[in-house]
Amino acid sequence: MKHLVKGAASAALFSVAATTALAEDITLRIGSGHPPGVVYAGLMIDYFQPELKKRIEERTDHTVNFVEGYSGSIVKVTEVLEGVQDGIIDIGGFCYCFEPSNLPLHAFQVMMPFGTMDPEKSLKIAQEVYAEVPYLTNVFPDKFNQVLLSRIADGGYNLGTSFPWENLSDLKGQKIAGAGLNLNWLKLAGVSEVQSSLATAYTEMKTNVYEGWIMFPSAWVNLKLYEPGPYYTLIGFGSMTWHGLTINKDTYDELPDDFKEILHEVAADYEQQTGIVNASEYDRLVDELRELITVSEIDPTVRKAWTESLADWPQSLADDLEAQGLPAKQVLNLVLDRAEANGYEWPVRYEIK
């Protein structure tokens, strides 16, 4: 066992078969490439870890402790999937945006921008899609030696910049950052895109590596991106559920059964918290930004024009992913249908054939 430190009812009984009968002292390495100022990473520290420790120690004879590795101190944002796979960390939170080759279909909501801005609704849509497409869950143990514990919702994406703008033409000639697939929201609309990550966002905005970011308000506030980016435009790209919390499968298999049961229970509650907290904080954070910088709402005609510029993109993605043997058309049509079933009306309804 690499990270599970066995408690000692009997030192001779050190086998997995005995774990359910013994009290154990369990230490888990947990982390993310993102800093705690990003909501899901903060919730890992403030909710997932203490809640797991509390419930385990109240309801079993086990104890649990964590070795923390946030802000890229153990694995960078691009290394979490591999880090969990190799056992460098036991539990990791990460964005699928940094795994375009390994998990190309998991960013399915990003393939349909201008969806719901409600993180709780985004999470519910994703949960329903995962329930109908087992591949989305099964690929983690099948290919990457880990178990998916939680899906993670983000706050609604808007556009923060160092300059004011009102129309798409105002963005031409400016460099705007994003991550993974959402770079296509910029490229297909004729805007110069730059791949980046929140770990370096403040410095790169400050030094004019780029002049803006596709970003949710929590990061603009918590990471003080409002300092180099004093303009925040409410365009409503959508709330995306495209992060995951996973555990190394070898570590998972060695856990006592009663520990596993509580782990899944806490992970499910943490999953819901990512939607609840992002939803409840959105208006407050936007109001906080209004006190600090210029916040404006984009004209609906500009939003619709941007949507229309992306109208053919989901079909193109679906065709490419189907050629790789992935159920992309099923997934994207489910996103459309589940969003509408949950009360969302698309500004331009994508067609996936």
Image: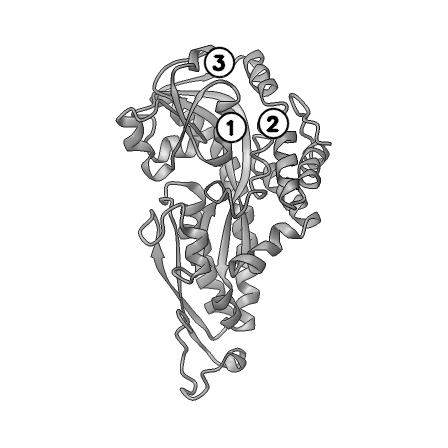
Relative to 316, is 253 on the left or the right? left
Distance between the alpha carbons at the discs numbered 3 and 1: 14 Å
Q: Which residue is mark 2?
A: 313
| Image color mode | one colour
Residue 72: x percent and y percent?
33, 48
The N terminus, quarter of image: bottom left
Q: Earlier in the sequence, mark 2 or mark 1?
A: 1
Distance between the alpha carbons at the discs numbered 3 and 2: 18 Å
2 and 1 marks in contact (CB < 8 Å): yes
Q: Residue at x 46, y 78 (%)?
A: 23
Secondary structure at numbered mark 2:
helix
Secondary structure at numbered mark 1:
helix
Q: Please, what is the three-letter code of the amino acid marked with disc 1? A: Asn
Q: Which residue is mark 1?
A: 184
Disc number lying in front (3 or 1): 1
Q: Earlier in the sequence, mark 3 or mark 1?
A: 3
Q: Please, what is the three-letter code of the amino acid marked with disc 2? A: Trp
Q: Please, what is the three-letter code of the amino acid marked with disc 3? A: Leu
Vertical relation: 49 (above or below) 103: below
Residue 4: x percent and y percent?
42, 71
Residue 319: x percent and y percent?
65, 35
User: From this viewpoint, which residue is outermost toward the front?
Assistant: 323
3 and 2 marks in contact (CB < 8 Å): no
Q: Residues within 10 Å of mark 2 (few under 14, many from 20)?
A: some
Q: Nearer the viewer, residue 282 or 334?
A: 334
Q: Which residue is mark 3?
A: 168
The C terminus, quarter of image: top right
Residue 185: x percent and y percent?
52, 26
